[in-house]
Image (tube, grey):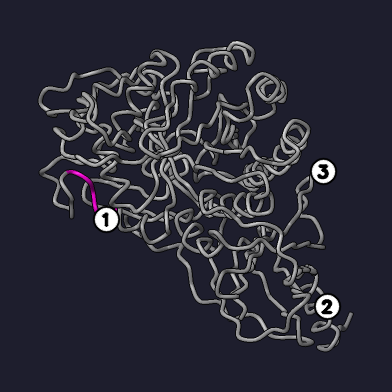
Amino acid sequence: MKISFITIMLLLSGSLWAQKEQAIISIQTDQFKQVISKHIYGHFAEHLGRCIYDGFWVVPSLDVPKEGRIRMDIVNALREIGIPNLRWPGGCYADEYQWRDGIGNPADRPVTINSNWGGVTEDNSFGTDEFMKLCDLLGCEPYLSANMGTASPKDLRDWIEYLNFSGDSHLARLRAENGHESPYGVSFFGIGNESWGCGGCMTPEYYSNQYRCFQEYARNYSGYPIKKIACGPNSVDYNWMEVCLKNIPHHTLWGISLHYYTIATGNWGKKGSATGFDEKEYFGGVKNALYMETLLKNYSAIMDKYDPNRNIALVVDEWGIWTDVEPGTNPGFLYQQNSMRDALIAASTLNIFNNYSYRVRMANLAQAVNVLQSLVLTDGDKMLLTPTYHIFKMYKVHQDANLLQSSVSTADYQYGTESIPGVNVSASKDKEGKIHISMVNLHPKKTIAAKVMLNGCSVGQIKGEILTSVSFNDYNSFDDADRISTKEYKKFKKEDGNGIHVELPPLSVVMLEVR
């Protein structure tokens, strides 16, 4: 049978076209919704594995730039993404941490056991004043997690006095003796962490009563008001949220937390590899990450019931993908690599947070260095920036910008009998009038031909940036640290005065800036 050359070309072009899905993205540029709080882009540093010790805080002999023992290449990298806040000292560690163990002459500090993470001992050389120095170097606000599990309301009261009181008292003098005469002025305090689990296995009724007591002693000293954040639910524990909002006086709450981790396999006992996974686990990872939107929708509805004026912030202070640890590493250290999949999960989650910023006003990715979905990995004097780091660098333009209403119409990404939205978007307008549109294509094989409609303005100058890779399990290694990094993006063109045609490659995050 003869087949003409023209017929072959038509068949080939049809096949290529089938690989290119269509999308319509609509953005209302003249209707501001609310400000996207910069604190949504916060991070987390727990005394866990190599996040603090051998991460931020290194031995004096390590040949890297340091301020004291604080590793400055990490600090400089985080400053570049505009880190707004850093949560410390935990996590589960917080409910066994005694803050007095970590002040004064380091040689006199007690050696204690980290019973939550690996059973290792710590010399407490990194404590309150060292953390405050780190935040100063980072240019970010501290977010302290108070011990409710093994400490008393007096311990919380005293810690705040040590940090914030400007007058003459024993604890203020002690702070001065330790090198900081002026008060630190800390605002954010979490009161209890995972109190439903590692923070005391409490019922919501018991916890809310404990919170009422502890928060009473979180005093506002010297004009530094405390923003009190209650321990909220884990994942889908809607009853915990209801009980807390019923029982806790709302004037005592700046916010209430939510924890949700993405498990690609859905099985906590076998979470899957950070890099050695197939499309089934890729799909499971992004699908489970997108469940964050369902959680925020449902929790926002509950909070609207009790707090219709939306005075109480939802604080998602632990989120990210959690995989099995890297082979040969301490299972209690939670060290995992970071792939293109993780970057797509981070970008999609940040789009969700932006779009729910009427209620979500703070969030903290777990964790900053060498633990879980890290921004930075280190090995001795070597350091690399993960794909997730590059997402936060791209998205920093949304911090404190005005959210713009956006919608997406496109075909789903299907795997087997399941499907998820293939594209997700958020958009904002900054103080200079620049519009930023962040678009994520989750399809592993299909390019999306998207038409972006900017309703309410005409399109002027456009700049683009992209993060992508060939495979969803590609990652940056110490031998190839820049395998995945941002690049200039030019596959767009103006259309119809207020339209932009954009080609979104498979597995890509694209940021457009429109003037």
Query: Which region of the structure is painted magenta?
Result: 69-74
Q: Residue at x 80, y 69 (%)?
A: 24
Left or right? Give the position of 383 relative to 123: right
Q: Where is residue 273 in the image (x, y as percent from the top left)?
A: 51, 39
Residue occupied by mark 3: 417
Q: For the residue labelled by badge 3, is the local secondary structure a helix, a strand or a loop?
A: loop
Check disc 1 and give the amino acid type: Asp
Q: Do the residues labelled 1 and 3 touch (CB within 8 Å)?
A: no
| Of pointers 1 and 3, the one earlier in the residue sequence | 1
Q: Nearer the viewer, residue 410 or 71?
A: 71
Q: Nearer the viewer, residue 68 or 117?
A: 68
- x and y, in percent, of residue 218 in the image: 44, 26
Identified at 47% across, 43% down, the residue is: 373
Where is residue 493 shown, x and y percent of the image?
A: 68, 85
Residue furthest out toward the right? 1
Residue 226 appears anywhere in the view: yes
Q: Mark 1 points at which residue?
A: 73
Q: Which class describes the residues within 10 Å of circle 3: few (<14), some (14-19), or many (20+)?
A: few
Q: Of residues 60 and 38, which is closer to you in this image?
A: 38
Q: In which quarter of the image is the N terminus?
A: bottom right
Left or right of 235? Residue 149 is: left
Label 1 element class: helix
Residue 11 is marked as 2
Cα separation, mark 3 vs mark 2, equals: 28 Å
